[in-house]
Structures are given as C-alpha cells and as structure tokens.
Amino acid sequence: MEKEKSAGELLQEKLLLNRKNIGMTADDASEQAAQDFCEPYKAFLDACKMEREAVSWIVKKAREAGYAPFDPKAAYRPGDRVYYNNRGKALILTTFGTRPLADGVRIMASHIDSPRLDLKPNPLYEEAQIAFFKTHYYGGIKKYQWGAIPLALHGVIVKKDGETITCAIGEDDGDPVFTVTDLLPHLAAEQMKRPLKDGLKGEELNVLVGCRPFKDDKASEKVKLNIIRLLNEKYGIVEADFLSAELCVVPQFKARDIGFDRSMIGAYGHDDRVCAYTSLMAAMEVKAPAYTTVTVFADKEETGSDGNTGLNSSYLKFFIKSLAAQQGLSGREVLSKSTCLSADVNAAFDPTFGDTLEKRNCSYVNYGVVVTQYTGSGGKYGTSQASAEFMAQVRRVLDGAGVVWQTGELGKVDLGGGGTVAKYVAALDVDVVDVGVPVLSMHAPFEVVSKADVYQTYRAFKAYIEAQ
C-alpha cells in the first residue's frame, strides 16, 4: 500500500514548484503516443533539409488538408483554410476562427532554416588536380564539426532564361556524397595549437567534389572541366549558372533513434524544424478554432531574420493587414489584440558540460516543452521578454490541458545568450513568449531531442490554439 504522506510532503506538493521527468509519470499509452508522433517527424526531417524543401513539403500537406492559396479579395468564413507562400522560402497558414478578428489572432511562429554551408557565387575550383566547392557558412556553427563527415548538396539553380533546376544529391543510397577534408593527426601539430573555434577556419571549409580529369591533354583545369561537364550533362548548366543559384551543403545523416530505449532522435536540423513540425501538426488538426490561427514558418532566423523572407521584414504584418481589411479593420487593431508563441528550441542541460548552465533555471531533456520568458544575452540585450500577464495566460492554458512543461534560460547570465523571432513579432505590438523543445548538441550537424519533449511541444501548441 502507498505510504501516507506527511504534513510536510503535502505542503511541498501544494506550495513548491515540482518538475518531474516525464518517464516517472507517463503511462504506456502516452509513451506510445510520443513514439507514434515522432515516426513521421523523422521522415519530415529527412525530406526537408533546407527552407525551400520545407515550404514545398508543408504546402503539399496543407493542400491535402484543405488549405488553398490566400486571396485578399475573397470572403472567408469560420473554418476556411488558406496559405501564403512567400517566395518559396517562408510560409503562413491560417484557419479562420469563429471570433471576430477584432479579438486578435493566435500566432505560432517557427523558422525552417538551419545552420549549414552555403556555396559561394563562384564555388568550383581545382587545385593539385582535385576539385572543390568554396563555401560560406550560414548561421552559428562550430566549424570543426563540419570536417570529415558525409555531406549532401541541396538547392536550386535558376538559369538565365528563367528555368529553375532543383537538386538534392547525396540523400539516396546510390548517390555520391561530399565531404570537407581535415588534416591527419600526424601532421596537425600546428593546427592543434589553434583555438577550438579555428580548428577549421572558414576558408578551409572546402567541399571535395571530384578528382577525375577530362581526358584531353590540351585543356587546362581538367578535373574542374570534367565536373562541370557532368553537371551540364545531368542538369544542362554551365559554370555561370552558379551565379544565380542557392545551393547549400548539409549533413547527409538520416534521422535516427538514439539510445537502447529509442527515447531520443538524432538528426540534422531539429533547430528549428522540430517546432515547425509540431506547430504544423497542431494547426492542421484544429478545424474550428475560436481565434483565427496564423502559423508562420520563417526563413533567415539563423542569420538575424533579415531579408524579405525573415521575420524582421514586413510580410507577416502585411498578411495580417490583408486579413483585417476583410472585416473592415486595420492591421494594428488586430495585432494589438493578438498573442504569439515564438516556436523555437532551447538548450537542454548536458551534464558533460554542466558548468555552462544554471541548473535551477535551465531546461532538461524529458521534462517537457520549454517556456522561455526571455532570451537575449548579458543584461537581456536583444530580448522582448514576455509580460507576467501573458506568462500567467500560458500557464493556465498548458496546465489546463495537462501539458508537461518547464521553463528555461539559454545559459548562465554572463556566459550564454541567443535570439529568436520573438522580438520581431513583439515589435508588431503582440504579446509573445518562446515555447519549444530542449535540444542537446544544438547547431551541431547531428542534434538530439527527446521524443517525449517533441510530443509535449505538439500538445502545447494544440492547447494554445484550441483555447477559447
């Protein structure tokens, strides 16, 4: 029989914050639900390694779920579903609610770009009869992690006549892969003296693409010529077409279960496609919300959210303005009454590097979705910070739905820091807070999340947009 609790234990339960590992409380059905939810998520990760692929994948799923392209001149009724595709690299999904837009909308905003190696405009070169691509890394990476691993080439090439060619080389079993070479330990004495951040320098992230020469004694740069010949035969391109291309090199790894208990997923791009996927699944399952839902999949977050597909631009504001006009409102009137979950990840406590996080205020693997009241760095620079009132609202929603959740910060005060899209949404006069999955090895080519945390994040987003 269960031992009767003491007065002190009962008071602890009533008064103290008590975070628990999901595994201590979850029943078999909940654990199986998390496993089932994460299987298609792994397929999404494998299919969507850059933002263009994510947009194409989401649009296909959205159309199957009844979403149609948004028409600013059309009249929409509660339950209608529309999407707005911004240049093939950012996307907004909306389901119209029963309440008037004057009451505001419920926004979930994730990003679908991840750190990677972008090809330079003039990437292909030959040296010592070996051909390489020059790259310029995108987002915050540890450069040394990108050496001596299998890589795949993804992206688009737009020829001068407007023809668009899409490529993804290295993902199928029969495809070749690529790699960044590194120096052998025997000759690396000087390299090993470098600071870790310079273990591989930016200009050393050169991608190996071939070494077979074109069989013509009179031609120069025979290996480079042979590579461009092969590309011309397959895609019909010439070297100048690299000037109008968006090509990137990403890890070739597939999403895999981690651990004897298969409790975690290792993959490239959890940050932030894990929040994109969970918010997408929540958005598509809610058929008749009270508040109109606006689910955003943004680009360029990893480089500061700038550009016309990042949330530091005006496309979200203009979209809300178009929605508002249909009910005779201004965009400002709708936005000022709206709320947002900035759907982004946080750093999970890693005991191997435990001195980087403040244990009372960081997030933990298997403790549920993370609510991050503020980000920024140092003295909270670069954060919007959610208000106490909105934090209380989020608490009510999550607790009311039985969602397992925790709070977190991104590192110790004088050590950590980082940013999300939250401050750009807050700049539109919207109440916003960061909500997402705790991640191990964030920004590495192979990141790790807990399946239980992924599932609770989906449940959090669903509870938020279902709340009356």
Image (tube, helix red, strand yellow):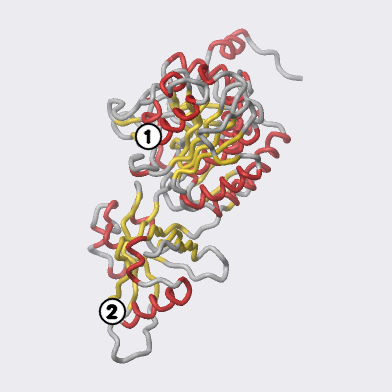
Outermost residue, top side: 7
| Image x and y of residue 247, in percent | 40, 59
| x 45%, y 43%: residue | 86
Provide the secondary structure element on which disc 1 rests: loop
Q: In the depicted view, which residue is nearer to us: 79 or 198? A: 79
Would you call the spot at circle 2 few (<14 residues within 10 Å), some (14-19), or many (20 or more)?
A: few
Please tell me which residue is depicted at 53% across the width and 63% down the height of the picture: 171
Q: Quadrant of the C terminus?
A: top right
Q: Residue furthest bottom?
A: 217
Residue 128, numbered circle: 2
Question: Foreground mark, 1 or 2?
Answer: 1
Rendering coords of residue 275 (x, y %): 52, 38
Indicate the secondary structure of the residue bearing disc 2. loop
**Residue 328 shows which numbered tag?**
none
Q: Quadrant of residue 173?
A: bottom right
The residue identified by callout 1 is 314
Estimate the spatial distance between the alpha carbons at disc 1 and disc 2, rounded to whole Å: 48 Å
Three-letter code, disc 2? Ala
What number of labels is visible?
2
Which residue appears farthest toward the front when viewing the image? Answer: 73
* Residue 444 seen by the camera: yes
Is 123 displayed left or right of 56 in the figure?
A: left
Q: Residue at x 49, y 71 (%)?
A: 176
Q: Nearer the viewer, residue 2 or 237?
A: 237
Tell me if 370 is positioned left or right of 190 in this view. right
Q: Are marks 1 and 2 in contact (CB under 8 Å)?
A: no
